Image (cartoon, rainbow, N blue to C red):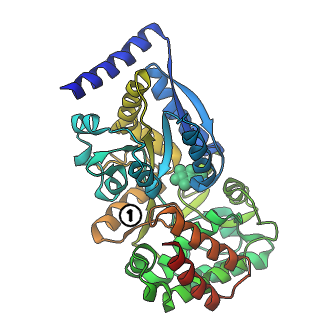
Amino acid sequence: MKANKTIKRAVALAMACAATSATADVEVLHWWTSGGEAAALNVLKQDLESKGIGWLDMPVAGGGGEQAMTVLRARVTAGNAPTAVQMLGFDILDWAEQGALANLNDLAAQEGWDEVVPAALQQFAKHDGQWISAPVNVHTTNWVWANKAVLDSVGVSEPKNWNEFVAALEKVKASGKIALAHGGQAWQDATIFDGVALSAGGPAWYKRAIVQLDPAALGGSEMLETFKRMEVLRGYVDENFSGRDWNLASAMVINGEAAFQIMGDWAKGEFLNAGKTPGSDFLCFRVPGSGGSVSFNSDQFAMFKVTGQAAEEQVVMASAVMSPKFQSAFNVVKGSVPARTDVPDTDFDDCGKKGMRELAAAASSGNMVGSMAHGHANPAAVKNAMYDVITAHFNGEYDAATAVQEIVTAVEVAR
Ligand code: GAL
């Protein structure tokens, strides 16, 4: 009863605000600062504005959200948590464990979230049976983005397996263009690793090694092959790759300076924001060898425990985020796919439709795995331990065999 009253009050608040055009503000901490991300964020801001909720922006740049999480810890420690926070996987559970998140059960029950949010996402949106965040999308990370004109100019078509991919990279390099656009930042190295691991070891091994942390699988021949493939890719990035932001790497493919980028489908947001069309201007395909599997991450808005009007605004925001119409409008721009199973693919472009199809297929075949790079395979300590080894190896500190030993040891220490 009390629940319904709160929801009703929240909706009434939204209507009253809209009627008087006075705006209450939600403060939202997020890391959506690139052109494509900002365009998607605008869809959310405008949606909330139409419901009378103003937006207090708290952007903290840095893909994967590490910097954002650091700022968040500082804010919470200072007793000043933001209203809503973009968060990934195990970070959400971590904050829930600490009792910091609001309970969204009443809204979830009223809107039937249990029935429409896939189980793989509920695993991170619920804690002890309580809804503690609202999932806004599903991204998948094992994608390659390619400039079609560059491929045409060197006579390359979409590579169907790993060897064809390497041959294509080689051809581009020989032509004088940059074969692989990449930014040398730990989370980007790890994002490449997600797709390469799936390609080299397959989803069953990925689950055993990367998710369940079975030391035999972690130290197995598949891991060696994964690091060897990472080394091959390292040979195709340009010499200025170190520290480059991911969206600048996307821009290199968009502008035809480079042929390929391995990146989650937020990269598509950059292509769209630059006015490019899938199929004619750019291609999207899975990291060769990883077809049939997806490594996923889901951006969710976790609501911190607050009281009074702010709590009511949280309910309005969570409800807005979960609306099927909004999920379509937002994800069409963001490059991701909806976090609900009942949203039609009508408004999505070819890459989006493919993404939705492949996600559904991987979910039913059991080949949908949590992205290690984006916090859906392990808690932060293990993730960071893996990051360290992957980056050190990518930068030539270890050979592949040493990297295998290092990752086994680092995980053992961190878990
Ligand atoms: C991911 C996030 C995406 C995307 C990306 C780059 O962690 O899930 O929404 O924005 O970082 O910033």
For residue 102, what is the image quadrant? top left
Residue 381 visible in this rendered orientation of the protein: yes
403 versus 302 height, above or below = below
For residue 121, what is the image quadrant? bottom left
For residue 386, what is the image quadrant? bottom right
Relative depth, front residue between 295 and 177 = 295
User: Residue under circle 1?
Assistant: 358
User: Residue at image x 39%, y 72%?
Assistant: 292
Secondary element at tag 1: helix
Q: Amino acid at mark 1?
A: Glu
Residue farthest to the left?
1
Packing grade of label 1 (10 A; few <14, some 14-19, many >=20) is: many
Residue farthest to the front?
78
Relative depth, front residue between 272 and 4 = 4
Relative depth, front residue between 330 and 211 = 211
Where in the figure is residue 29, as x and y percent of width and height?
56, 39
Where in the figure is residue 393, as x and y percent of width and height?
68, 80
Where in the figure is residue 273, as x and y percent of width and height?
62, 44
User: Residue at image x 45%, y 7%?
Assistant: 20
Where in the figure is residue 48, as x and y percent of width and height?
46, 26
